[in-house]
Amino acid sequence: MDVVVTSPPYNIGIPYRSYDDRRPRAEYIGWIGRVAEELANCLAESGSFFLNVGAPPKDPWLAWDVAREVGRRFVLQNVFHWVKSIAIDRESAGKQAGLDRDLALGHYKPVGSRRFVHSAHEYVFHFTHSGEVELDRLAVGVAYQDKTNIGRWGRAERDLRCRGNTWFLPYDTIQKRSADRPHPASFPPALVERCVRLHGLTATRLLIDPFVGIGSSAVAAARLGVPFVGFDIDEGYLAVARDRVARDMAISGGKA
């Protein structure tokens, strides 16, 4: 397989239907290591493994401990911050933004605590076998805000630059969670699409998600026209995943 994009359980007590998300910490980290070992045996030498992990406020090291364990089998090539919500001050945005007030965007989930602040991001760790995998950076690039930079920077051949490692990707608005997103911890298909495009669309002959859940990665693969295989232990989630892909393809006019 050429690309893995996945988000395993975080071991923070999320109420999955078929999995106990409260294992002893050492046991959980060891389990993640075994998953990484299997993926290392299957990932192409030039492949990319994108691992989405979050951490609770009381255990901020958890995501990095997971990354260290996976790093025993892979090289950590990039670290991305998936920003789920952000507040932008009008003054900081500048006059070009045309804002008449401060702006708050994305999925806000309040925290009932006097010690911790709202968690607005998660990590996406990009692992490879060698740390030397070339990426299609401009496939997820952004236009220069100051167009004079196009000529000023020697490598700028067009109005497009590297996006960097901060990705603002909010969830799609839903009307009813039980019907529209019946899973307690899913990521948006756009996150998977960005990972695949960054690795290189033509270089992705097979995309894998070993924790496919309700199929966000499957939907992304269908939209991109990339062959895909996903796994999950919950038959109910898999049924939802199949329905989501079929529904998305029906809307877009493609084939699931």
Image (cartoon, rainbow, N blue to C red):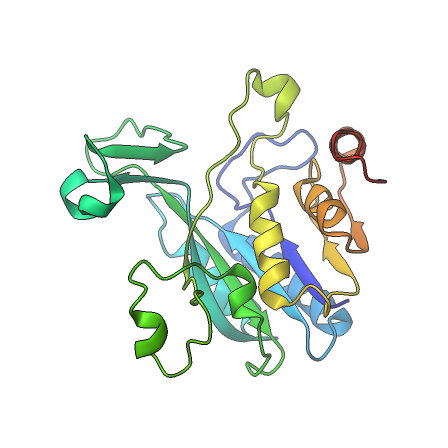
Q: Is residue 41 left or right of residue 74?
A: right
Give the farthest residue toward the top. 176
* Quadrant in the rendering for residue 135: bottom right
Is 53 situated above or below 45? above
Q: Residue at x 46, y 76 (%)?
A: 157
Residue 15 in which image quadrant: top right
**Occupied quadrant, residue 49:** bottom right
Q: Is residue 243 above or below residue 42?
A: above
Q: Residue 38: horizontal and vertical position, in percent?
A: 73, 66
Figure quadrant of the N terminus: bottom right
Q: Residue furthest right?
A: 255
Tag count: 0
* Picture quarter with the C terminus: top right
Q: Is residue 146 visible?
A: yes
Q: Is residue 7 visible?
A: no
Image point (65%, 67%), residue name: 200
Q: Whole-percent x and y of residue 174?
A: 54, 22
Q: Residue furthest left?
A: 91
* Residue at 52% in and 60% down: 140
Q: Which residue is nearer to you in this view: 75 or 3?
A: 3
Image coords of residue 25 (percent x, y): 50, 52
Residue 147 % position (x, y): 32, 64
Q: Is residue 65 left or right of residue 186?
A: left
Of residue 208 and residue 53, the one placed in the foreground of this image is: 208
Q: Is residue 197 above or below residue 221?
A: below
